[in-house]
Amino acid sequence: MKLGFIGCGVMANAMMGGIIKAGLYKPEDIWGADPFEGSRQKTKEVNGINVTDSNVEVLENCDTVFLTIKPQYYAGVIEGIKDHVTDKHLFISIGAGRTLAYLAEQFGKPVKTVRVMPNTPAQVGEGMSAACPNEYVTEEETQRALNILNAFGKAEIMPENLFDIVTGVSGSGPAYVFMFIEAMADAAVNGGMQRKQAYTFAAQTVLGAAKMVLETGKHPGELKDMVSSPAGTTIAGVRELELGGLRTTVIEGVTAATEKSIAMQSAK
C-alpha cells in the first residue's frame, strides 16, 4: 500500500516526516502533489518522497490519500479527481469546515472518507487529531487512518457533531498555550531572567505538566493540589490567577472559538 498527499504545505510535510520517522511508510512509498514547483522541491528535499504536479497521478499510485489543501480549493481539486476515484481509495481530509456531507456532495458518489481535525503541534510529532469516518469506511480502514495519525501525535475517533468544540479546544488551543508561555516568560524577565532562558523555563514547565496529566492519569486538580503546599508560593500564585479569572477566561476563549467555527460553517 502507498500513501498520497494532495497538497505539500507545512502541515503535509510535518505529517510525512512523522510517518516516515515512525516507519509506517518508506519515502519511496509516499507521493505528494502540488501545483507549485517550490513546494514540490522543498518536499522532495525534506522528506525524499515522490513528487508530481498531477493530483491524478497520486490517485493512480496510492490507495490512501490525504487532502491537505486549503478549504477554498476543495471543490476544484475534487472536481479534477473524482472521475479517477475507485473503491480502493481511502481519503483523509483535514480541511477545516469541510464536513463529510460537503465532501460527499463534491464527489457525487460513495467515497470512503475520514474527516480529521489536526493541530499544529503535528509539526513536532505531538499533534492531537480528531477523526470521523463516513459510513463507507471499514473498521480496518479506520484503524489504518488512526495508525497514520498517531505517527505524528495522538488521534481519537470523535463524532462529527463535536468537531466544532474540537476546533475550540485542540485546533485553536496551541495559541492559548503560546500566550500562557509568553506571559510566564514575561514575568520571569520582569524578575531578572534572560529572555531566551525564560522561554525555556516556561515552555519546559508546560511540557512537563502536560505529560504528567497524560501519563499519570491523575485529575489536573489533584496534580495542582500536590504542588500547592500550605502557605506556600504555589498557592499564593494560584490565588492571584483565580482572582484574575483565569479559568473563566479560558472557558470563554474556547467557547468563542467554538462558536466562531459553527458560524463559519453556517456561512458557507
Image (cartoon, rainbow, N blue to C red):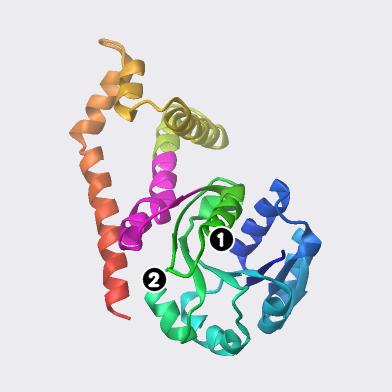
> What residue range appears in magenta?
155-182
Residue 8 seen in the current view: no
* Foreground pick, 47 / 58: 58
Instruction: Return the mark for residue 1.
Output: none
- Quarter of the rendering occupied by the C terminus: bottom left
In this rendering, would 209 be left or right of 89?
left
Q: Looking at the picture, which amino acid does disc 2 mark?
A: Gly
Q: Which mark is residue 141?
A: 1
| Percent coordinates x, y for residue 112 in the rendering | 52, 72
Q: Residues within 10 Å of mark 1 (few under 14, many from 20)?
A: some
Residue 104 figure quarter = bottom left
Residue 40 occupies which quadrant of the picture?
A: bottom right
Name the secondary structure under disc 2: loop
Task: Give the quadrant of residue 237.
Answer: top left
Residue 167, horizontal then vertical, whole percent: 37, 58
Does residue 80 appear in this view? yes
Q: Is residue 243 above or below residue 120?
A: above
Q: Which residue is mark 2?
A: 97
Alpha-carbon span between mark 1 and mark 2: 23 Å
Residue sitting at x 39%, y 40%: 183
